[in-house]
Amino acid sequence: MSKIKERTGTPSANGVSPQQAVAGPLAPPRVSARRRRPGVIALSLALIAAGGAGVAVLLLQVGNRTPVVTVVRDVQVGQVLTEQDFGEASVALNPAVKAVRAGDLKSVVGKRAAVELKPGSLLSPSQVTKDSLVRAGEQLVPIGLKPEQVPATDLVPGQTVQLVQVPAQGAAAAAADETDDDGVPKTIAGRVVKASKAAPGTGVVVVDVATSAKDGPTAAAWVSTGTLRLVLDAPDGR
């Protein structure tokens, strides 16, 4: 039995086996391209557009700033307005906000504050009036209050008060003449127009109170005899 010697392929001189030479060169590995999803592209474009619109609105607001009048110090109701009460600021105004333009400042100087003004706020036309707190048919009665008669609550223009007649010291017997038929002290309705600071040394505060013309002389008589006291009404008038 003859032996058949199995032949094995030997590498050629260039290091490539005969099988490999027959098969041909190896192809490089295939890299699959990333699939593009239309939804992601659309979302990206929408975000870019939204960001651009936001920047445009911001730039528009910065460019459309309006010089307006601002309050720089406390102003009481009824106080005459001066240029020193106001400043100027440049702001982007909402169309719903009514503010006095800086160019119209002189039109409000010399008028009165219709409400109490606080520093840092914008001045609106409705906060200014040309009317005095002493109205037609009224009189102004100055009342001096000693320290023990001054309320702890600050007296500000516009507050409603009652002027009350009380018995004078050493005149208790005459108290009946100072009350009405029900024994209730006589009162006069009034409204604070202005209150001074406490005088140095004495602490007396002078309050200007507006009353009806018919009650003005009576209130002045009570002041002269020292029988008048000032009582604050509740904020809601009750």
Image: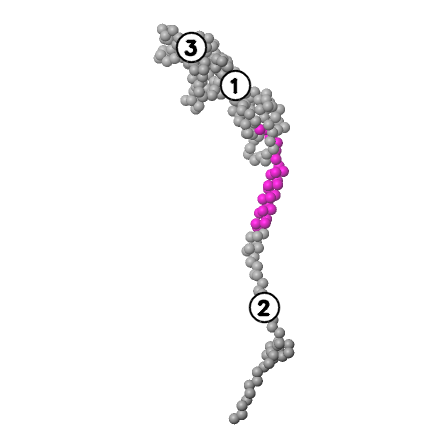
Residue 21, label in figure: none
Residue 57 is inside the magenta segment: yes
Q: Earlier in the sequence, mark 2 or mark 3?
A: 2
Of labels 1 and 2, the one closer to you = 2
Q: CA distance from mark 1 to mark 2?
A: 95 Å
Vertical position of residue 68 compared to residue 157: above or below = below
Can you see residue 142?
yes
> Helix, strand, or loop for circle 3?
loop
The span shown in magenta is: 46-70
Residue visible at 49% across and 21% down in the picture: 156
State the CA–CA distance, disc 2 to disc 3. 112 Å
- Say which mark, if any, is on residue 227: 3
Q: Residue type at mark 2? A: Pro
The amino acid type of the residue labelled 1 equals Leu
Would residue 115 be counted in the magenta stretch?
Answer: no
Q: How many marks?
A: 3
Question: Which is more foreground, mark 3 or mark 1?
Answer: 3
**Between discs 3 and 1, the one toward the N terminus:** 1
The residue that disc 1 covers is 133
Whether residue 189 is visible:
no
Q: Position of residue 108 (x, y in %)?
A: 59, 24
Q: Amino acid at mark 3?
A: Thr
Q: State the image coordinates of residue 126 (x, y, percent, origin top left).
A: 54, 26
Camera-side residue of 215 and 164: 164
**How far across and down, in percent of the image, does residue 135 sit?**
52, 17
Q: Quadrant of the C terminus?
A: top left
Q: Nearer the viewer, residue 6 or 210?
A: 6
* Above or below: residue 3 compared with residue 181: below
* Secondary structure beneath label 2: loop
Dot 1 falls on a residue whose secondary structure is: loop
Residue hosting label 2: 29
Report the residue at 46% width, 10% height from top.
223
